[in-house]
Every structure is written in structure tokens, then in C-alpha cells.
Image (tube, rainbow, N blue to C red):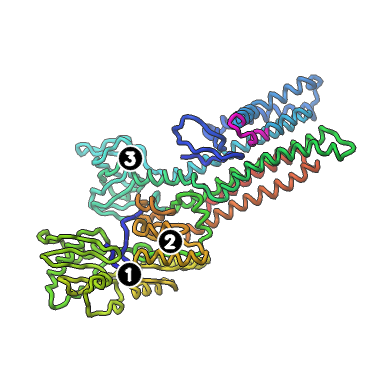
Amino acid sequence: MIHQDLEVKNTKNKTKPSCCCSHDEPVHSENDGHDHGHDHEHGAEGSLFKLFMPSIISLILLLIGIGFDNYIPQNWFSGYVRIAWYAIAYLPVGLPVLREAYESIVKGDVFSEFFLMCIATIGAFAIGEYPEGVAVMLFYTIGETFQGMAVTKAKSNIKSLLDQRPDEVSVLENNIAVKIKAKDAKIGDIIQLKAGEKLGLDGELVSDSASFNTAALTGESKPDTKKKGDTVLAGMINGNTIAQVKVTTAYNDSKLSKILELVQNATTKKAPAELFIRKFAKIYTPIVVYLAIAICLLPMLFVDNYVFSDWLYRALVFLVISCPCALVISIPLGYFGGIGAASKNGILFKGSNYLDSISKIQNVVMDKTGTMTEGVFKVQEVIINPDFDKEEILKLVNALEGKSTHPVATAIHNYAGPIDSSIELKNVEEISGHGLKAEVNGKELFVGNFKLLDKFNISYDIDPSSVVYTTIAIAYDNKFAGYLTIADEIKADAQETVSKLKTLGVKVTMLSGDKTNVVQFVADKLGITKAFGDLLPEDKVNKVNEIKAKNETVAFVGDGVNDAPVIALSTVGIAMGGLGSDAAIETADVVIQDDKPSKIAMAINIGKQTKKIVWQNIGLAFVVKAFVLILGAGGLATMWEAVFADVGVALLAILNAVRIQRMKF
């Protein structure tokens, strides 16, 4: 049912972040049974000693070799023995990269980062620079290991933030609490929660009341008191009394499972910067290989004292520096960090592309009811014409509203009491944007807004605009019977939201189906200058189209399902999701789980900070690499500078990328 603005819609709404440095990878599920490409996550599990063992062996052998070369000369350490020593030092870190290069070539991707590193290090051996050849591969491997650890940590951080379900739950069997695996709990089982214990599955509260910490779902630790029959969700933490919960959803179908899956899959929707850098790397890598060949061979045509080994060394340095690894790993990691930071605060992004889009939002257009107001209505006045029996009309209205799950219906039920089961309603019809119509006792009953009465040419003797509250018009037997007034409270952080949005340079507009004077009253309280009431769903679409016609970006904030056309039309659709309901997750691009409008500004700020970090990384990588590339081509940079330009910049970019998860928003 729709009573003016009152379209409050019941929408209380794995892939690896792959980053092959030179090509796009297909997306596979975890059960594909085989690996694909290179994602900087290989070897990122297990003990630190096991992870770094190959690097430790190579480092020890390299240091001993350098000692024999420069500090403790040995007569036997020369010729083939010296070559063999450095070759053995090279193998623990070099063999995995040689294998990756071979597999990439077999798949048709010749110009991968592995190919670059193999050419550079084998070339160093070819011209007798054995220590440098080992050092380049060693530090490259160390850098790769750290990158894999960073990606794994970012993923596990997000999972630990969200997947807070316990492995075991206490189920009552003959009034005795028995511990079982959470995934083995069945629908209908009664779980007993001790004080401070986490709920493992979604369910319905059986106890009279209980207080829950909902931080795992909303980012807010403020206790939420639930009453008997209320829905409680997996991940909520019980307060200081024992509570009993009846399981209503299987373990794998819980809201938390779906939220976790949503966030993990968000990395498959790439932001423009990610897509660009992948395409760039695919073109850039072969170009630098050809440039390296040119650096090595072309000077023989122009330089009198041309020495092949000198120019080959410069070309090899150039290849090491040119590896685009820092860009291709740090950029997705930056976006993944943004998704994690948002999740921690109860904001779900369905893809990193939406993080990018929300950072550029110029307009926020919002619904009123359920978005800026609580959506919890109370009847204020009941004005019934003397020609009608007030008690009878209220019973009829209550019965018709019984066909609706709208908050207005709840307010009327709370006021009028239980529905009279003896009332027979026929031909019940919902008229979109207007209200409900039915036949009772052979007469037509209309309950909705005054546009509903206008539609059916029923005259009334009041001016709807003179009533400040939301009005529910009633007509019976084609005569105006009176009206109810209903009030809704403005959310506590609504005014703060508008203020923060203005600070971010975002224009705010309120659209509502509620009466214009009610909408304007709320808008004035919140400091919103543009507000429009008496709108049907298609009118909201037209208003958003007017903004888009000015070539401005717009985010629409609503309650999900009934606002789906406007959400789909907007640059970014944001749903006030009420603990992550399925409908809102399906409909919107961004879901705010605790219905707090202040999270709108927070989401935009997270998008802006994420984009800033991504561009900092792009700038850092390009500037340092360009500088060292020029030095390398001119013979002024050695392999050691090349290692810093590749591995050092990658690690700096990664440290910068993970920084967003520690920011306060």
C-alpha cells in the first residue's frame, strides 16, 4: 500500500583479488580444482618461516658469495665453482619464477612480469653479474611474498569483521543444552545463548526480551533490545541475560553468509582505474621489452666505443625497473581496503566500481520515509464526519489495512486494536501511489491519500495542504468519511547527514510521495532547500532524469524494492538496508545495514579516500619508475636501484593501500 510518501518498502535491506601484472585472468570459483594465472596470493598461507625459507637460503648463499668476492677472498672461489655457487643461490627463488614464466608463455601470454624478471636475471648471469642476478630475483621474490601476505591479510580482515559466527552452538534437547556444530543445527531448533555469546544462525527470539550487540552487521556496538518474536541474526552478541532463539534459517542461508559472499564477490566488479591499469600493463610490458632490445642494440650504430655487455646491462636494468607489479597489485588492494573499511562500518559496496562512482557524486536524492525519518508511525488524530459511525469506519479501515504490511497499517492496527474477523472484504485492490480499494457490505471503501479520492471523483470538504501531518483519507459508499493523521519521527542523525553532505560539496534533494507541506516541513528542519512532495514513483524518475540531464552524477537513497526504478537510473543506488535484507542487497549498489542516514556521507568519504590512495599509488609508481628508467637507460642506475624501483615501490604502494582500513570515518 502506498499512502503518499509512505512507500516504505519492506526491504530492510570468491574470487581472489587477482592481479597478474600483465594480463587479465578468468574468474574461477574456489572449487575449480586448478590454479590460474598469478594473483600475488600464492604462498601467502602457512608459517612465516616456510614462506620465506627459499628467500632465506638464497640470501645466506648470496651473502657468503659476496663475502668471498670482496671481504674474505678464497682461491677456490673462482671460475665454474663461483658460477655454480651463485646458480645454487639463484635456484630457490628463481625456479618458481621460471616455472611461472613458462606456464604464462604456454598460455599465450609471453610478456608477463615473470618473463621480464627471467630475462633480466639470466642476462645478468650471461654478462658475469652473478650477485646482481641473484639479488634481483631474491628481492623480487621477497616483494612477491609480502604482496601475497598483504592481499591475504586484507581478505581475512574483512572476513573476520563479518563472519563472526561461532563454530558451535548450544541447542536445547529435553531442556538440556547440548553443544553441536553450528552448521548441523536444524530449522526449528532452540539455541540457548549465554551472556556475551554470539548467535550462530538467524532465528526468532523465544525469550520475552534480550539485548544484542549488532556490531558485526552494522558497525554499531550500541545494544539493540529485541522482544519475543523479533528476528535476530547470526553474528549478534547476546547481552547480560540468557536468551533462547528458535532457528529459522539454515547456516549457509543466513544474512551474514549472504553479506560475506557479497563483499567477497565485490572484487569481481572492477573500478575504471583497475581496468585501465590492466589494459595498460598488457600493452606496456611488450613495449618495454622492445625498448630494452633497442637500448641494447641501437647504440652500436651511433656510439664509437660501443661495448655490448655494457649496453646489455643497461637494457637489463631497464627491464627490472619496468615491471608494472607495483601498480597492478596496489590498485586492487586499495579498492579492497576501501570495501573492507566500509564493511567495518556497516556499509556494503557491491563492487569496487561503485567506490569509484560514489567518490564523484554531485547530488544525493533521498526518499523521506524510512530514509530520513524512522518510518514508525503513530496515529495523531481521527477525524470522522458525523454522518458516519466512527467506530464502524475505524473497524473497516483496520480490516482493509490488514491486507497491507505497510508501517501505516501497523500504526492503524496499534491504534484500532485487533481486526474484526467478521468483516468480509471483496475485490481488494492496491492502486500504486494512491492507496487501497475494496468492496465491503456491497459498498466501496477507499483508504489512501487524497489523490485516491480525486481519481475516483469523490469530493471532500477540507484542504489537505492545511494539515501538517501525513493524512490518510477515507471514503465509504462513494462519500468522504473523514481522515486520519499520522506522524513519523525524523531520525536522530538526519540533520547531521545533510550538514556533512554539504561539507563534502554534495547537493541534497528530497523526493517524496507524501504531502508537499509535510515534505517541506521535514526539509526545513533538516536544512534541505530542494524538496518535492506529492510524487508518484514515475515522478521521482523524472526528477532524477532532470538532474542527469545537467550531466551531473546522482545517488538515490531509498528503501530498495519500490524505489528500484530510481535506484537503477541513478549513478549509484543506495538502499537503507536494515541489517542486510535480501531485497535491498539485490536492488542497490550500496547497502547501509543499520538505516542510519549519516552513513551516506561516510560512504562518499570512504570512496573519496580510496580514490585518493589509488591515485597516490599510481603517481608514486610512475614518477619513481620513470626517473629510474631514465637513469638506467643512461647507464647511471645499477640493478640495485632497479630493485628499489620495482620491489621497493610495490611495497610502499601496498603499505599505503592498506592504510585506509585503519582510518576513522
* Residue 53 visible at all: no
Q: Position of residue 466 (x, y in %)?
A: 29, 79
Q: Position of residue 431 (x, y in %)?
A: 26, 63
Q: In this view, does 449 lie above or below 83?
A: below
Q: Residues within 10 Å of mark 1 (few under 14, many from 20)?
A: many
Q: In this view, does 135 lie above or below 546?
A: above
Task: State the CA–CA distance, disc 3 to disc 1.
Answer: 40 Å
Residue 78 is inside the magenta segment: no
Tell me: 257 left or right of 77.
left
Pointer 3 residue: 251
Pointer 1 residue: 514
- Mark 2 against mark 3, which lies toward the viewer? 2
Q: Which residue lies furthest to the right in this view?
A: 304
Q: Range of the magenta residues? A: 105-117
Residue 556 badge: 2
Q: Name the residue at 26% across, 45% down.
A: 245
Task: State the CA–CA distance, disc 1 to disc 2.
Answer: 17 Å
Residue kind at label 1, given as amino acid type: Asp
